Image (cartoon, grey):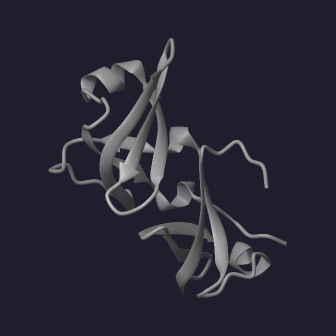
Amino acid sequence: MLTSARNQFLGTVTAIDRGAVNSEISLNVGGIELTAVITNHSVESLELAPGSAAYALIKAPSVIVLTDATIKTSARNQIWGTVSRCELGAVNAIVSITADNGPEFTASITLESLHELKLAPGVRACALIKASQIILATKS
């Protein structure tokens, strides 16, 4: 599977909370519990069930970076860790955050945000990902 998503994680479905139209899928990815919201149709077509394997795909621009732990947010997935690297471009930067107990998440943010948040390797930061921004995939 080749995709343009910077964040690609293989995990195990731990729970499915089915609603009228959408389902919340809990996926354990390297010790991190991610929550994705997908349609019930997608749950069926991907044949998702607790214990099944699935990939979580998250494009870097969908990852929001936060450094202030006192800020409350509605983002379902809040992964705290340490900035492991920053790649500076002309307008944007790529920031990688290694989770405290899991994988590395990559975000694409503006240079202005990078400087405002004082991001650099070793800085404590949080990767915020809305559940609706996670795409799930399975092998056919």
Q: Image point 24% across, 26% down: which residue?
A: 118
Query: In the rendered image, is residue 39 in sight?
Result: no
Task: State whether residue 88 is above or below residue 140.
Answer: above
In the drawing, does residue 63 fall left or right of residue 16?
Answer: left
- Identify the image quadrant of the N terminus: bottom right
Residue furthest out toward the right: 140
Residue furthest out toward the top: 90
Q: Image point 34% across, 26% down: which residue?
A: 113
Residue furthest out toward the left: 70
In the drawing, does residue 31 fall left or right of residue 139?
Answer: left
Residue 15 image position (x, y, % from top left): 52, 84
Task: Decide which of 96, 62 is in the foreground and name it.
Answer: 96
Residue 58 image position (x, y, % from top left): 58, 51
Task: Decide which of 93, 134 is in the foreground and name it.
Answer: 93
Q: Image point 44% across, 40% down: which residue?
A: 96
Task: Decide which of 115, 30 is in the foreground and name it.
Answer: 30
